[in-house]
Image (cartoon, rainbow, N blue to C red):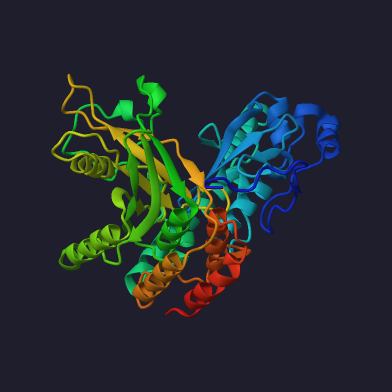
Amino acid sequence: CLSSGSEPPGSPQVVEDGGEEDEEELSGGEEAEFRSSSGRGSLLTRRGITLRVLLKDGLVEPGDGVLAIHYLGKNFVGDLLNDGKIRWVETGQIFNSPSAWATHCKRLVNPAKKSGCGWASVRYRGQKLAQYKTTWLHKYQPSADLSMVSEEDDDEDEEEGKAAVQADEKNKNNKPGLHDVMVSRRADRERIPVRYCSLGTRDAARDPHTLVELSAFSAINRFQPFNVAVSSNVLLLMDFHCHLTTSEVVGYLGGRWDTNTQLLTVLRAFPCRTRLADRDTASAVEEEICQNLFMRGLSLVGWYHSHPRGPALPSLQDIDSQMDHQLRLQGSNNGFQPCLGVICGPYYHGNQGVASTITPFWVVPPPEQRPNDYGIPVAVEVTYVQDNFLTSDVLNEMMLLVDYYRTAPDLVQFNQYWCPDTTMLDKIKGSLSCHAPKDQAYSQILEHVYSQLSNAH
């Protein structure tokens, strides 16, 4: 339940609504009427050129993942089916036209959106569908007025530009609010991850926030050198902390390392109730966490941090930090003790459903013959252990976090909407339910915490 959302439905829902301003697709019979009147010489209107027409005439081909929409920083991917319909990869829903799919996707990001400008928004193998219309007209109706095809394109680009400007103005004048997650194009601009093999030698000019895809241990001819078990209460508290603010948060992980079984057990999360830039209080907070670890008989076994609006993948900076933590935990006696890094992505629109993506990772040092390369970030296989109860210890920590962020300008506005039918409060509830203990009474216990969130600000 960590990063998976709802499964594609068994019988896909077909969506026909294409928005008020967009052309509707023609049925197969209507297309045939256009053809039979005078063959290719008949003038098809913009409404008459459908995906089925483009498929029949060989301008496009069916395929998986060949269609895409990029809207206000969010990406959607679709399959083009043999009958000219579109299947949205994320949910399996079937759409009759580019307009229907574009309108549906855009309303998820911007509920005020009335239409999708489908042919200007949907790209086939990187090129806007409107351009394939133009190609069709050039080929079969060279005398047609091509302006009727391109006018949507300008509307769409203009809207994207306006949205970016409006978002910038809003960010200048207002406190940051979670509404910006949905509508600010610049703040939510895609950080495209790169493959490790493309990095090469360490380069000071490279952006330290560059995200890097994780490798598998098997891909670098290694075995994972330790096993990891993480309790559900750790995930619940960590996920809760990361949901509270639009800013990055950090915390530590406490547990035990068994040298005989090579098992790292993560038993408790310790959120840092401090700002990342506040160095004055950071040392005091870390000292308090060290005392808490000692009192519970736990060792420091890892750390976590959030990427509030981006993919839960490590940046170059994260890779270096993780390597530092690993070396520090190893100690001076050269005895091996692993340090687990975890990244939580609560508000990334690429997540499946409402659940946060939670990514455990480790860094393998670069090969000895290439000491100036970056460390290699690898995915860590983890066993998740369901706790019996939500402990009072965790509940108390949750309330302390609510109190800490209550007056923060970047506190998430939980009464606002994550998507058209889901509030931010619904989203955090849904994500935390993935880490539920066996005792179902936990949901009633958490209602008090949720009521405090609703009343915050």
Quadrant for the C terminus in the image? bottom left
Q: Residue at x 75, y 29 (%)?
A: 41
The total of numbered circles placed on residues is 0
Q: Is residue 62 above or below residue 309?
A: above
Q: Position of residue 316 (x, y in %)?
A: 27, 40
* Residue 382 at least partly seen: yes
Residue 281 % position (x, y): 19, 68
Instruction: Please indicate whether residue 306 sits to the left or right of residue 25 in the image.
Output: left
Residue 177 higher or lower than 96, as above or below: below
Percent of width and height locating residue 190? 41, 47
Q: Which quarter of the figure has residue 77?
A: top right
Residue that appears at 62% across and 47% down: 118
Of residues 23 and 244, the one drawn nearer to the viewer in this rendering: 244
Left or right, residue 342 beside residue 16: left
Position above or below: 28 against 139 = below
Image x and y of residue 138, in percent? 61, 30
Closer to the camera in the image, 4 or 38: 4
Q: Is residue 248 visible?
A: no
